[in-house]
Amino acid sequence: MASPSSLLDHKSELVQKTVFSILFSISFAHLLNDLIQAVIPSVYPILKESYHLSFSQIGLITFAFQLTASIFQPFVGYYTDKHPKPFSQVYGMLFSLAGIVSISYATNFYWILGSVMLIGTGSSIFHPESARISNLASGGKRGLAQSIFQVGGNFGTALGPLLVALIVVPYNQKHILWFVIAALLGVAIISKIAFWYRDHLIFRKHKTPPFIDMHQLPKRKVQISIAILLIVIFSKFFYSASLSTYYTFFMMDKFHLTIKQAQFHMFIYLIAYAAGTILGGPLGDKIGRKYVIWLSVFGATPFALLLPYVNLFWTDVLMIVIGIIISSAFPAILVYAQELLPKKLGMVSGLFYGFAFGMGALGSALLGKLADYTSIQYVYQVCSFLPLIGIICYFLPNLKKKG
């Protein structure tokens, strides 16, 4: 029979290994969470037609969702840094479930607003703790772990429009209730992860947080670097808001497509976006996150500038390229920020997820106003310049260690 000390050594060895079963489980939970979120923009054409909504109101719906999905995240992360709550994600998924049921029966603009805010609250509870679990299960391969986690969310976002086109568009708003299945499955998976997380926390009590690499940067340099990353998040997610919220309308307006046809083209872009996420984390582990962030934001510029002026075929081609390039940034950004503030994993994850959602909210609201006053195609012409801001990444310090 093994002695307690040998069992402890065995557990300690396991903690240092990459726990792929947990990474893939949390990634699948992320898929389900973001699939539920993706229902919101996917049903915009149905809601707009049914309740005679303006683009400004569509923007406000996104704003309400993104605001609740962003404003609580840093606070959730800050609190769980000090008081980890392994089962908090279960409560988050229950909020999302309530939001899906509510939006299925919503009959006016304000009811829709309340419904999306429930889903946003669920998302704000889910993300900070999930990012921490990915770090704990990474075995030190933080970029890879973050990419596995992120790609689940991106595939969920990609599946949303496709499933809405198949399940909801041919029928009616009530068929959104089918997505309750995703929420219930999410609760089951997150519950199993929560037990692993709880046991992991008990084992690690009074020990140094895992996989912390202490840099030697002065505090001022860290603050400047965080500010640069937030500016990059602004550029990336403001531009992404034009793609996620209004791309269906852009395709319908410019190429005279049906809702179902436009959703298919949206799916092409979102699959490319998911594929890019797989590359960003491991590439950051290999060559340094600074270079991945720089190239993935600034590198999308020529393709974004061309997008408003090409035909349908080249629109799909450019959107695939833009999706792959720009999506590789976020895993690298998040892990880079965690390395800048290694003792505040929950808070920094909540801050960056929250700021990302917040920029998406602000972008959706302002771009909706702009679309009402001008046109949806003009919105895309203006937004095509946003990736240029990515050049500021040149000033980030390189945290990749030699050898």
Image: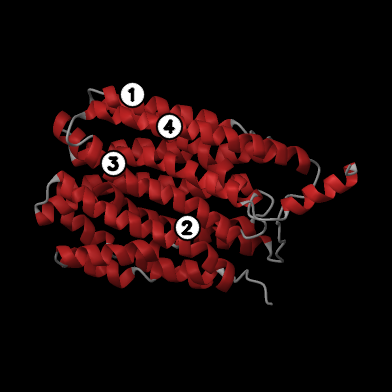
Judge whether residue 367 can be spotted in this image.
yes
Q: Hey, which quadrant is residue 299 in on the image? A: bottom left
**Disc 1 and disc 3: Cα gap in Å?**
19 Å
Q: Which of pointers 1 and 3 lies earlier in the amino acid sequence? A: 1
Residue at 32 percent across and 51 percent down: it is 241
Q: What residue type is labelled 1?
A: Ser
Q: In which quarter of the image is the C terminus?
A: bottom right
Q: How crowded is mark 3: few (under 14 residues within 10 Å), some or many (20 or more)?
A: many
Q: Nearer the viewer, mark 4 or mark 2?
A: 4
Q: Where is residue 122 in the image (x, y as percent from the top left)?
A: 46, 33
Residue at 69 percent across and 38 percent down: it is 82
Q: Which of pointers 1 and 4 lies earlier in the amino acid sequence? A: 1
State left or right for residue 168 relative to residue 215.
left
Q: Which amino acid does label 2 sit on?
A: Phe
According to the picture, the residue beneath numbered tag 1 turns out to be 102
Q: Where is residue 221 in the image (x, y as percent from the top left)?
A: 62, 64
Q: Determine the secondary structure under disc 1.
A: helix
**Disc 4 and disc 2: Cα gap in Å?**
25 Å
Classify 287 as above or below 264. below
Foreground of the two, 85 or 274: 274
State left or right for residue 300 relative to residue 52.
right
Q: What residue type is labelled 3?
A: Leu
The answer to whether marks 3 and 2 mark residues whose Cβ atoms lie closer than 8 Å is: no
The answer to whether marks 1 and 4 mark residues whose Cβ atoms lie closer than 8 Å is: no
Classify 219 as above or below 298. above
According to the picture, the residue beneath numbered tag 4 turns out to be 183
Q: Which of pointers 3 and 2 lies earlier in the amino acid sequence? A: 3
